[in-house]
Amino acid sequence: MQLGLFSISYGGLWGQATLDLKAFVRQAAKLGFDSVMLAGKRPHLSPLDFDTATVSWLGEELKSSGVKCTVIAAYTDLTPAVASEVPFLEMQIAYVESLCRIGSALGASIVRVFTAYETPGQSPHANWLRVVGVLREMCDRAAHFGITVAIQNHHDVALHTAALLELLNDVDRTNCKLGFDAWSPALRGEDLYEAAKLAAPHTAITTNADYIKMPRYRYRPELVNYESESPELVRAVPFGTGFIDYGAFFKGLRDGGFDGLATYEMCSPIRGGGTLDNLDSYARTYLQWMRKEVLK
C-alpha cells in the first residue's frame, strides 16, 4: 500500500498555509510520502493554468523530488444546477477529460470524481440516471488516456455503500472504480469493517482524515434550558485521535483485497490552526500511524 498526501491540504481554502505545487511536491517528499494527489483546481492543478510546457515542468519536479503523482482530484457535481440551455454537464465532462490528459502526462493512473448533490424538486431516479450517463462518458473518455475514474463517497447520490456499489454496477465500465473513504460511512453510522470489506474489491484509492464530533445546543430562554441541534459539528484532529475506527476500516479493506493508495487530506479547519508547522505535524502523524497500525 502506498501512502500519499493530498495537495488541497496546503491549498489555503480553510485558513491553512498555502503552498504552490512546486513547494507542495517538495514538502511531500521531505515528509516521506510515496506519492501525491493533486487538486484539479486553483490554486493547484487547474486545466486553465497548465499547458504542455507547465505540465512538463511539473513532471520534472515530481521526478527530481522522488514522489509519484498517482491521482488527480476532480471537483464535480453532476446536478443540473443551472438553466437548461447551459451545457453544464458537458462542461464537467470536458473538465474531467482535460484532467485525464494532464494526469496521463504526469504518470497518474486515476482521476477522482464526485457524483451529485440532491436539490429540492429533483427526481432521485432522474438524478441517478443522469449521474450514470455522465460517468459512463467520463470513463469512456478517460480510457483513451489509460485513466481510471474513481468515484468518491462524498456527494448525496449513491452515498451509502450499498448504493455506491449499485451505481458502480450501473455504470458498468472496467475503468470505473471507487475512491472509498471512512469518514462518510462513520458519520452516517455504517459498520466500517463491513462497508470497507464490501467496497475493497472495487476500490482504487482511499482518502483519510480523522475527526471529533462536537454536540450542538440552542438556548431556549422561555424554558431556561437547552435544545439539542442536529447534526453535530465536526472538526479535524490528528490522525488516530478522533472517533473514526480506522483500525476496523483498514482491516476491512485489507480483508477485502485492497492494496491501493491511501492518501491523507486536511480538507477542513483543523485543531491547532493552519500554520505550516501544524499541517506538517498532522501529515507526519498520519505516516506514523499508518506505518505502525497498517503497514506493520
Image (cartoon, rainbow, N blue to C red):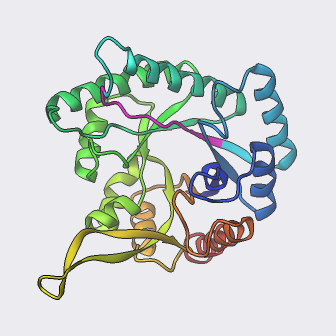
Q: Residue at the location (60% across, 69% down)?
A: 295
**Residue at 81% of width from left, 61% of height from top?**
30
Q: Position of residue 94 (x, y in %)?
A: 50, 19
38 or 8, which lies in front? 8
What are the residue bounds of the magenta stretch? 70-80
Q: Nearer the viewer, residue 15 or 106?
A: 15
Q: Is residue 79 magenta?
A: yes
| Residue 110 on image: x %, y % | 55, 37
The verdict on residue 182 being magenta is no
Q: Position of residue 66 (x, y in %)?
A: 82, 49
Q: Is residue 197 above or below residue 220?
A: above
Instruction: Give the number of marks.
Output: 0
Which image quarter is the C terminus in?
A: bottom right
**Residue at the right extreme?**
64
Q: Residue lying furthest top in this view?
A: 85
- From the top left corner, tell me how far across and down residue 279 is, in percent: 67, 66
Viewer-side residue, 20 vs 132 = 20
Quarter of the image with the N terminus is: bottom right
